[in-house]
Structures are given as structure tokens and as C-alpha cells.
Image (tube, grey):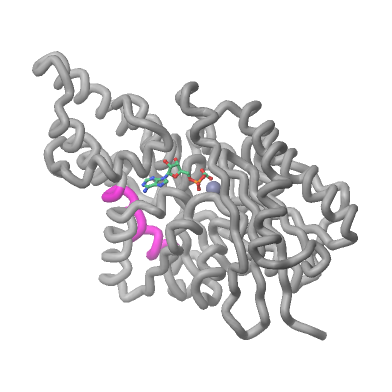
């Protein structure tokens, strides 16, 4: 049997439409043959956030072009592939339905097998696409809708060790940017503005710091930033460039310190729960693109003598390659889906752990 596999990955769960082809030969490093990502930022800009209906329609419009482009760029035809992998949840349901329907059409037309992929699993397993990594490892998944520490035991076995009890860090970056009149998505913009700022200028809270466990909270942070902003405006009449940079730098530092402090705790909890040290600590999801957060967690790993891996930036944010990779992991175990594959807005990775108390809004997705 030929052990080389080529899988098309399709992603449409939020505001990125993406298609990618990943090839893997057993015993060798996987290779991303091509990847197309179309971000919908400009479509949603005027509304100050993602409008689900607009997102779903844009995905349906763009999925076929993204797929043709990625096939052309890899110089492949659909029938050169072995499988089609598609995000089947969790995410904005209209977008997930667009992707799943499109994948079903491709599978029906080509006769290729299809696998539905959990978007969170894809983020958590990305590090196996970009680095040679064995199980079990510890992953901090930090994105616009999620924040959880996961013990990753196999491609479909995850234990949630802790996570946010309210907002996800990406959500906090996005809401804070909105409060400061900065553009979306907030994370990369705040990171850029923060470069010239003083991270110790404002003492924003580190919620749950003194509580046991590795749960986190970010909703209070944006409220204290709002208060600080109002204070500056009442005293100085406006927010100068320097003040803006200081606010962004202090906010980013607060998020980063909260995440790194709880990473230290999560390492201990992993050992108690799994019965051994993790092979490494991986960070993934859009917020993992943040250089300060990467550096602060890398420092925690260095002190604990644990290897630290963070995927290249293009594989941190939503992308088709991570979906294709999970497709390969599932293909190897013959774990295919039929045409009854459902699109799911919610799809927890760890169904045995009870929901985190107070886990709110978009956090319930996790
Ligand atoms: O994983 P992702 O692309 O989509 C979700 O599944 O949520 O993550 C998007 C989130 C957004 O909230 C965005 O502001 C944040 O990731 N983000 C960042 C950075 N780049 C993206 N946050 C902090 N620093 C960054 N450099
Ligand atoms: Zn994501």
C-alpha cells in the first residue's frame, strides 16, 4: 500500500475562508503543498464585529475559488487527492454549514472519502503538522472564541485541564481595540501599537492569579482599561499617541502574564492528571501569533525544562492546512464520515469534563 496521502482541508468556521492541500508520507515530515486564505475583515469592518450572515454568504461565494486556486497552485486535480477534510464545528453555524455542504458536493462528485474535523482539535494538533511531536503533550489553545489548557493524548483524546471562565483572550483583544477606536481584528493591531508603549504604566488586574487551578478570566481586564481610558480623557481631554501605546502595552502585558502564570500551574496539573510530564508545551490559535505571549510562555517552559513549540504565524490563525492535517490523522485510522455529517455550532473536545463554572458567551463553544 502506498503510504503517501494528499488531503484537501476546508475551513469556514469564522471569518477566514481557506483551502489547503497537505501531503504526508509515513515516517516523513508533512508538507503543505498549497494554501489559500481569504480573510473577510473588510466585509465586516463597518459593523465593528463579525456579522454571521455576511460571513456565511461570503464563505459560499469564495469556497469554490479558494479550492480551485489551491489545486492549481499545487498543480493537482481533485482526483489526485485521497480525501476531503472539512471543519464541521464548532463555529458560526452559517459558515460551518457552507463548508460542510461544499465538501459534501465535492465528495459526491469525486467519490473521495470525507472527514469532518473539530476546529479546536485542528488548532491543538497543528503542532504535529509543523514539528515532529509525540503524544502526550500540553497545549494552550488561545483564539478569538477559545482559551483552554489541553492534555493532548491522541488525535481524538483530549483532557481539558482548565480554561477561561468568561471571555477568550482574542475576544478581549478585539473588544479592547474597539474601545480604543482601533481596527479589527484587535490582537495584531494592539500588538503593533504596544511596541512603543510602556507595559508597566498601568496596573491592570491579573484575575484568578491567587486561585488554585489553571482557569483564567479576561472580562474584568477590558472594564479596567475602559475606566483608565475615561480617566485619561477627563484629565487630558484626549488620548495621545503615547497614552494609547502605554494602554496597549499594559493590556498586552496583563494578558501575557495571566497566561504564562497559569501555564506554570497547568504543567503541574498535567503531570498529576496524566501521570507523566508532557513531551512538550505547544501554543496554538490566533492569539498564539502574539510575540510577547510566545516569549513569556517559552520562558516558563525553559525554567521547567520542557520543550516549547509555537507554529509559524500563518498556521496559528484559522487555516485550511490544520484541517487537512487532522484529515490525514483520521484517514490513517479509517475514521471517515458519511453524507449525514452534521455542521455543529458547539462541539466540546473533552466531553467528560464538566463545563467551566461561569463559562460564558462564546466560551460555551469549548
Ligand atoms: O484562531 P483564530 O484565527 O480564530 C478563532 O478561531 O477565533 O483567532 C482569531 C483571534 C482574534 O481575536 C485576533 O484578535 C487574535 O486571534 N489574534 C491576536 C494576534 N493575531 C490574531 N491576538 C493577539 N496578538 C496577535 N498578534
Ligand atoms: Zn480558530
Q: Position of residue 135 (x, y in %)?
A: 55, 73
Q: Quadrant of ligand 1?
A: top left
Q: Nearer the viewer, residue 337 or 94?
A: 94
Q: Is residue 156 visible?
A: no
Residue drawn at x 67%, y 38% as measured from the top left = 59
Residue drawn at x 89%, y 54% as measured from the top left = 109
**Dominant secondary-structure state across the stretch colored magenta:** helix
Location of the C terminus by quadrant is top right
Q: How many marks?
A: 0
Q: Nearer the viewer, residue 333 or 166?
A: 333
Q: Position of residue 360 (x, y in %)?
A: 51, 32
Q: Position of residue 50 (x, y in %)?
A: 53, 30
**Residue 148 included in the magenta stretch of the image:** no
Magenta region: which residues? 256-269
Residue 75: quarter of image: bottom right
Residue drawn at x 26%, y 70% as measured from the top left = 303
Q: Going by the image, does 49 lie left or right of 155?
A: left
Location of the N terminus by quadrant is bottom right
Q: Is 124 drawn above or below residue 18 in the view shown?
A: below
Q: Is 262 drawn above or below residue 268 in the view shown?
A: above
Q: Nearer the viewer, residue 133 or 64?
A: 64
Q: Position of residue 138 (x, y in %)?
A: 47, 65
Residue 326: quarter of image: bottom right
Q: Is 8 drawn above or below residue 231 in the view shown?
A: below
Q: Nearer the viewer, residue 352 or 343?
A: 343
Q: Going by the image, does 87 lie left or right of 292?
A: right
Q: Going by the image, does 240 lie left or right of 221?
A: left
Q: Is 106 drawn above or below residue 6 in the view shown?
A: above
Q: Report the residue that reaches farthest toward the left.
A: 235
Q: Is residue 116 visible?
A: yes
Amino acid at each position: 500500500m502506498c503510504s503517501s496521502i494528499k488531503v484537501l482541508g476546508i475551513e469556514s468556521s469564522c471569518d477566514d475562508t481557506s483551502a489547503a492541500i497537505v501531503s504526508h508520507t509515513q515516517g516523513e515530515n508533512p508538507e503543505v503543498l498549497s494554501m489559500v486564505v481569504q480573510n473577510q475583515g473588510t466585509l465586516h469592518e463597518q459593523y465593528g464585529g463579525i456579522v454571521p450572515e455576511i460571513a456565511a454568504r461570503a464563505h459560499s461565494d469564495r469556497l469554490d475559488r479558494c479550492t480551485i486556486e489551491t489545486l492549481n497552485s499545487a498543480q493537482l486535480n481533485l482526483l489526485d487527492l485521497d480525501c476531503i477534510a472539512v471543519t464541521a464545528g464548532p463555529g458560526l453555524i452559517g459558515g460551518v454549514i457552507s463548508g460542510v455542504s461544499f465538501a459534501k458536493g465535492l465528495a459526491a462528485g469525486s467519490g473521495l472519502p470525507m472527514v469532518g474535523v473539530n476546529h479546536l482539535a485542528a488548532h491543538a494538533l497543528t503542532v504535529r503538522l509543523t514539528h515532529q511531536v509525540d503524544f502526550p503533550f500540553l497545549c494552550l489553545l488561545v483564539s478569538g472564541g477559545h482559551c483552554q489548557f489541553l492534555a493532548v493524548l491522541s488525535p481524538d483524546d483530549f483532557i481539558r485541564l482548565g480554561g477561561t471562565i468568561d471571555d477568550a483572550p482574542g475576544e478581549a483583544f478585539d473588544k479592547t481595540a474597539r474601545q480604543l477606536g482601533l481596527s479589527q481584528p484587535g490582537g495584531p493591531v494592539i500588538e503593533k501599537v504596544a511596541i512603543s508603549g510602556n507595559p508597566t504604566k498601568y496596573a491592570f488586574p491579573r484575575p484568578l492569579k491567587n486561585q488554585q487551578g489553571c482557569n483564567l478570566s479576561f472580562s474584568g481586564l477590558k472594564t479596567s482599561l475602559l475606566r483608565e481610558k475615561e480617566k485619561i480623557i477627563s484629565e487630558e481631554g484626549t488620548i495621545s499617541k503615547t497614552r494609547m501605546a502605554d494602554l496597549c502595552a499594559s493590556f498586552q502585558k496583563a494578558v501575557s502574564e495571566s497566561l504564562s502564570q497559569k501555564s506554570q500551574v497547568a504543567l503541574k496539573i498535567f503531570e498529576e492528571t496524566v501521570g507523566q510530564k508532557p513531551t512538550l508545551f505547544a501554543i496554538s490559535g490566533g492569539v498564539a501569533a502574539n510575540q510577547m505571549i510566545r516569549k513569556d510562555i517559552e520562558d516558563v517552559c525553559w525554567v521547567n525544562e520542557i520543550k516549547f513549540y509555537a507554529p509559524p504565524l500563518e498556521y496559528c490563525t484559522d487555516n485550511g492546512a490544520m484541517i487537512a492535517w487532522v484529515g490525514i490523522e483520521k484517514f490513517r485510522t479509517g475514521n471517515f464520515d458519511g453524507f449525514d455529517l452534521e455542521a455543529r455550532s458547539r462541539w466540546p473536545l473533552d466531553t467528560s469534563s464538566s463545563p467551566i463554572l461561569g463559562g460564558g458567551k462564546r466560551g460555551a463553544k469549548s
